[in-house]
Image (cartoon, rainbow, N blue to C red):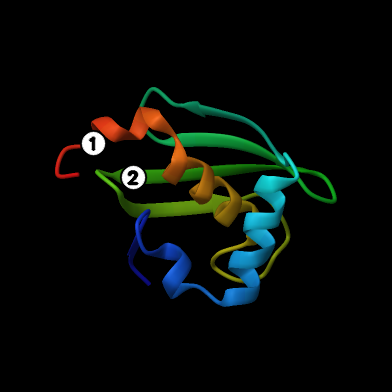
């Protein structure tokens, strides 16, 4: 499934979006940094602390992964980071926005 920072919450299951939003509100996104290759790496607290990586081109989400054991393609930890990235002012410099 292809989605962007603008619409991911409209395309993912509502319960997953709600859990990701709650994680962000609870302060579970502990650290987030931009890597040398331009991706975003985050630590998110759940049952354990999980590593989330998000690759963006402009605001299109090219790839996303999490170290948690969730069997699906997108987990609540990734959604929390996506919400953080959406609101972060450093992303305002993306072309085309």
Q: What residue is shown at x 72% (from left), y 39% (from top)?
A: 27
Q: Position of residue 25 (x, y in %)?
A: 69, 47
Above or below: residue 2 compared with residue 25: below
Element class at badge 2: strand
- The answer to which of marks 2 and 1 sits earlier in the sequence is 2
Above or below: residue 64 compared with residue 8: above
Q: Position of residue 57 (x, y in %)?
A: 26, 45
Q: Marks 2 and 1, how far apart in space?
A: 10 Å
**Residue 81: mark in rendering:** none
Q: What residue is shown at x 58% (from left), y 75% (from top)?
A: 14
The C terminus lies in quadrant: top left
Q: What residue is shown at x 70% (from left), y 65% (from top)?
A: 70
The N terminus lies in quadrant: bottom left
Q: Position of residue 64 (x, y in %)?
A: 47, 53
Q: Position of residue 41 (x, y in %)?
A: 53, 34
Q: Residues within 10 Å of mark 2 (few under 14, many from 20)?
A: some
């Amino acid at each position: 499934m292809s989605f962007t920072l603008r619409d991911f919450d409209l395309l993912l299951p509502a319960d997953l979006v709600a859990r990701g939003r709650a994680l962000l509100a609870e302060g579970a996104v502990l650290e987030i940094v931009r890597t040398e290759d331009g991706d975003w790496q985050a630590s998110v607290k759940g049952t354990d602390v999980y590593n989330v990586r998000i690759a963006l081109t402009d605001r299109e989400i090219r790839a996303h992964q999490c170290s948690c054991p969730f069997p699906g393609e997108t987990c609540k930890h990734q959604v929390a980071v996506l919400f953080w990235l959406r609101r972060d002012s450093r992303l305002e410099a993306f072309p085309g926005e």
